[in-house]
Image (cartoon, rainbow, N blue to C red):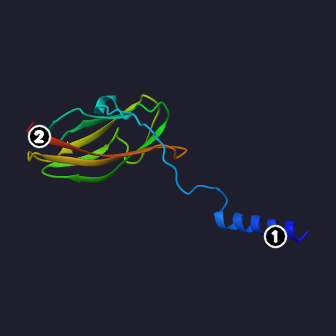
Amino acid sequence: MRHRRLILALFVLATVITGTAGYSAIQAERSVDVTVADDGNAYLAVENQNNSVENGSTEGVLSVTNQFGREVELTVDDVETTGSVEYDSVDGATSDVTLSADEQAMINASCTGTDDGELEVMVFVESDDNELSVRTMQVVEISCTSN
């Protein structure tokens, strides 16, 4: 009987000393394929539409197309302008714009003089369920022409 207790005690001691045969690290091979698309073919297609705006008028200078296949909310933030260039709106709206799949919106700018300048905007889109969001900075050089 003592012999069995001794063997059992040695077994328990050996188990405690050696651990539970778990592992603390693993190394595995993984691959990732990344494809870069130009602006017109991206999920959020942002393209320059017009580099010349007549003094006193408003023109669409950037088109934003939703190519995600689902509805998204478009927001324009962090607007900065130089020269006579002024940010106007997105499709005439001063707040967020909802874009359905494959729908396009225009970011509008105006010129209040003939000094050429830039329009810099942060374009942000987000889905209703917050699973999708994209943020991109866009800069457009605009020539303000006289009427």
Looking at the picture, does residue 5 appear above or below residue 102? below
Q: Amino acid at mark 2?
A: Ser
Instruction: Name the spot of residue 55 as percent of width and height, x first.
Output: 13, 41
Instruction: Report whether 27 appears left or right of 107.
Output: right
Snapshot quadrant of residue 89: top left
Q: Residues within 10 Å of mark 1 (few under 14, many from 20)?
A: few
Extreme residue in the front direction = 3
Quadrant including the C terminus: top left
Residue placed under numbered mark 2 in the picture? 143
For numbered disc 1, what is the local secondary structure? helix
Extreme residue in the right direction = 1
Q: Which mark is residue 6?
A: 1
Q: Is residue 61 visible?
A: yes
Q: Is residue 125 visible?
A: no
Snapshot quadrant of residue 136: top left
Residue depth check, mark 1 versus mark 2: number of the one nearer the observer: 1
Quadrant including the N terminus: bottom right
Q: Report how far apart the C-alphas of labels 1 and 2 lie in the structure.
A: 93 Å
Name the residue nearer the viewer: 45 or 88. 45
Looking at the picture, does residue 44 appear above or below residue 133? above
Instruction: Name the spot of residue 20 as percent of width and height, x first.
Output: 67, 59
